[in-house]
Image: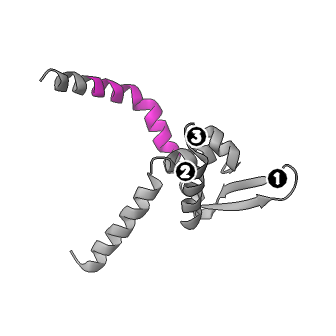
């Protein structure tokens, strides 16, 4: 494998790791549920368990990657709104597909986990 191909694969892997991070897909899903834009606190409420610090870090990473833009709202009520950029809009379909797949197959995955756990506990 050439150094160029290896470097490209590493860079792609870094981006994939960032998009598929523990909280990132949930944050992207919250934005998808709100037509691609939401205030910080609305996202926080939509992602149970995420801390303010973690959400801030996640949104900054998405902003750095060009997927969301941050806008300070100067009219009452004051706040910060995040919305998909044109590039971020391209993630809406794959994110929705992952959520749909999860909803469709979560019972089957739980059943497979129970079968596996049953086999490994007997040893």
Q: Are marks 3 and 1 in contact (CB under 8 Å)?
A: no
SS state under label 1: loop
The quadrant in which the N terminus is found is bottom left
Q: Which residue is mark 1?
A: 78
Q: Is residue 99 highlighted in magenta?
A: yes
Confirm whether the magenta stretch covers residue 100.
yes
- Tell me what residue is drawn at x 73 percent, y 61 percent: 71
In the picture, which quadrant includes the C terminus? top left
73 in relation to 34, above or below: below
Q: Nearer the viewer, mark 2 or mark 3?
A: 2
Q: Which residues are magenta?
A: 96-114
Q: Position of residue 10 (x, y in %)?
A: 33, 68
Q: Which residue is mark 2?
A: 54
Corner quadrant of residue 64: bottom right
Labels 2 and 3: the sequence-earlier one? 3
Q: Is residue 49 left or right of residue 112?
A: right
In the image, 88 versus 58, the foreground residue is: 58
**Cα gap from disc 1 to disc 2, whole angstroms:** 21 Å
Q: Percent x, y for residue 33?
A: 63, 42
- Give yes or no for contact between labels 1 and 2 (Cβ–Cβ under 8 Å): no
Give the SS element for disc 2: helix
Q: What residue did someone put label 3 on?
A: 47
| Crowd around label 1: few <14 · some 14–19 · many ≥20 (10 Å) | few
Q: Position of residue 67 (x, y in %)?
A: 58, 61
For the image, the number of numbered tags is: 3
SS of the residue at dot 3? Answer: loop
Badge 2: residue crowd in 10 Å (few <14, some 14–19, many ≥20): some
Say which label, 1 or 2, has the lower sequence index.
Answer: 2
């Amino acid at each position: 494998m050439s150094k160029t191909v290896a470097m490209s694969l590493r860079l792609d892997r870094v981006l994939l790791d960032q998009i598929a991070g523990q909280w990132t897909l949930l944050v992207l899903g919250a934005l998808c549920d709100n037509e691609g834009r939401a205030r910080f606190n609305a996202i926080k409420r939509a992602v149970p368990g995420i801390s303010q610090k973690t959400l801030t870090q996640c949104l900054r990473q998405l902003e750095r990657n060009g997927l969301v833009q941050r806008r300070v709202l100067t009219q009452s009520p004051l706040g910060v709104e995040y919305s998909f950029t044109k590039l971020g809009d391209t993630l809406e379909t794959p994110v929705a597909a992952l959520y749909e797949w999860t909803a469709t197959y979560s019972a089957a995955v739980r059943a497979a986990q129970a079968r596996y756990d049953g086999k490994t506990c007997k040893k």
